Amino acid sequence: MGLVGFSLLLFIYYTLWVIVLPFVDSDHVIHGYFLPREYSVILPGIAALLLVLFVGTFIAVVMWKNRKPKKTQ
Amino acid sequence: MTKLMEWLSGLTVLGVLWATVTFDLLGLDPPEAVLQVSWPLPVFLLVALGCFSLGTVGYRVATFNDCQTAAAELQEQIREAKTELQRKGLRF
């Protein structure tokens, strides 16, 4: 259930950031709770990169541990 | 047309629409707020899809019923599989 709550929170924050904030006056106090808009693309990009790196590293480690030495004649 | 072609054409059409709005290719001059919503839109849809998937997985895991006999059987099978694979040389 924690996962559901976390993903809901993330969705609401991100939706506010990308969809709602451009229609709010630039001197409204809510803008202080959100980073500049560039980060709304950069941060998910970094998260996706980290995920791919993690999965790739995991596969590499498991495959490395299971390499068989070459048989000598 | 194969499914792949269908998906690619659909994505291309949406991509062209997005590029037209974001980079103002037709000279329509959309208002500033529309531009600010439009350019992160692909990333936003991906993040929304990710959140939805995460939430669905979390919900289904949380509401899944316990099956005692199946759980015991599965753990026995895991033990068997581990010993078998270790015999064959796979290291965990």
Image (tube, coloured by chain):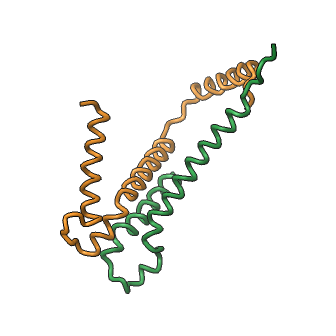
Chain colours: A green, B orange
Q: Is residue B23 left or right of residue A35?
A: left
Residue B27: % across, % down:
19, 68
Quadrant position of residue A24: bottom left
- Above or below residue B34? Residue B68 is above
The quadrant in which the C terminus of chain B is found is: top right
Residue B2: % across, % down:
27, 30
Q: Residue at x 33, y 82 (%)?
A: A25
Q: State the residue in front, B81 or A65.
A: A65
Q: Is residue B89 left or right of residue B69?
A: right
Q: Residue at x 71, y 22 (%)?
A: B85
The quadrant in which the N terminus of chain B is found is: top left
Quadrant position of residue A65: top right
Q: State the residue in front, B12 or B81.
A: B12
Exactly how many numbered labels are in the figure?
A: 0
Residue B29: % across, % down:
21, 72
Q: Residue at x 47, y 56 (%)?
A: A7
Q: State the residue in front, B45 or B52.
A: B45
Q: Residue at x 28, y 75 (%)?
A: B32
Name of the residue lying farthest toward the front: A73
